[in-house]
Image (spheres, grey):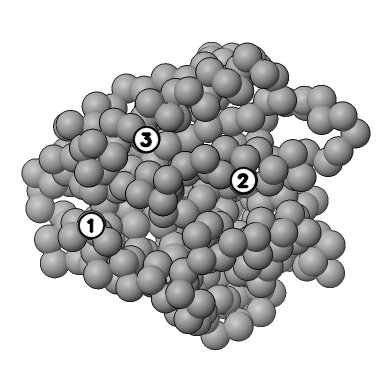
Amino acid sequence: MNPNICDRLAQKLSRITSGNYTPSDFIIADAKDADMGGGISGLGFMTDKSGAQKTKTAADYQASMKEMMGSGLVDIMLTSMWSAEELHAQKAFQGVDVTPAIRLNDATDIWGYRGAVYREKPATPFRTARLEQAGKLCALGLYAITFYNDRDRDVAALNAYRDFREQAHAAGMLHFLEVFNPAFEIHTGGEDLDTFVNDSIVRCLAGVAKSERPLFLKMQYNGARAMSELASFDPANLVVGVLGGAAGTTRDTFELVAQTERFGGKVALFGRKIYGAEHAVELVRLMRSVIEDRLSTVEAVRIYHDTLTKNDLVPARALKDDIVVTDAVLVPEAE
């Protein structure tokens, strides 16, 4: 493992791929790279003392990163190049066993800022970050790809990923691979989208040498069957993780991490689900308890609301609403 990957992450990945996984090895990453897709609006909003809503600043965003790293609860802090440089200048990674990572491509299907309509069309491969600059700050990066069952578009995306791997390997940069579901319905010849995505991933990586393969995957949770199929395909060489997606209820968050782990996933990379929480550190602490202590997701929500009350924090939803599973893909396994 690259010496710039922190010991905690390296050891967890080693135990996962060697078949010695225990729930305490589940990897949690805080995805604080929203500025790469959402610009200023990606960082969220806050209410000032007068009651007026205003956008959060880069300093606000970076403060939340440092708070989470200081908690000792996350294994990876994923950021934009901009944030990574600021955090390193502030020596934020010193004294914490957290692996820094940078988003290394920003294809057009993540461009979701105010007024943008890019997600209405298939993604065009694009990279802002330069590997030689990223390599000065970290040894791990994120590369994202989306498959559309469109030969020319998918070939272009795969060629861009091939070029990235070649450059990353030459630069000594490790990566993990994010695979998005298309943002709109695509034709899959009568097959379910989840099977198309699973097969696309395995086909994509089948010709990739081990030295250039991603350390793990970050993908949308497409249900128990899909997660189980992909996670059991080749667990020694393909570590599957889930992305957080929309904010949803607190119960949704706990169910997503619980179901991911139950059906073979070993990684959760959450952005809005963490950053949008009323008490982000407590949310992640309870995510760990759901995985490691088998705390029920219902009880986790109750404890979370108790913590909010004790800290004089106003919940975004009443407990009766926050304890409901609203994400349709999670409902069958939550009932």
- Residue 187 appears in which quarter of the rendering? top right
Please tell me which residue is depicted at 38% across the width and 26% down the height of the picture.
Answer: 163
Which quadrant, please, contains the N terminus? bottom left
Question: Pointer 2 and pointer 3: residues touching (CB < 8 Å)?
Answer: no
Q: Which mark is residue 2?
A: 1
Q: Label 2: how many residues lie within 10 Å, few (<14), some (14-19) or many (20+)?
A: some
Q: Who comes first in sequence, dot 3 or dot 1?
A: 1
Question: Pointer 2 and pointer 1: residues touching (CB < 8 Å)?
Answer: no
Q: Secondary structure at mark 2?
A: helix
- Residue 171 appears in which quarter of the rendering? top left
Please tell me which residue is depicted at 78% across the width and 59% down the height of the picture.
Answer: 225
Amino acid type, mark 1: Asn
Res 56 seen here = no
Amino acid type, mark 2: Val
Between 40 and 167, the one nearer to me in the picture: 167
Q: How far apart are labels 3 and 1 at the CA level?
A: 16 Å
Q: How far apart are labels 2 and 3 at the CA level?
A: 16 Å
Q: Which residue is mark 2?
A: 202
Q: Which mark is residue 165?
A: 3
Please tell me which residue is depicted at 48% across the width and 23% down the height of the picture.
Answer: 159
Please tell me which residue is depicted at 72% across the width and 50% down the height of the picture.
Answer: 222
Res 77 seen here = yes
Between 6 and 252, the one nearer to me in the picture: 6
Where residue 3 sits in the image (x, y, percent)?
A: 18, 60
Q: Who comes first in sequence, dot 2 or dot 1?
A: 1
Q: Is residue 5 above or below residue 128?
A: below
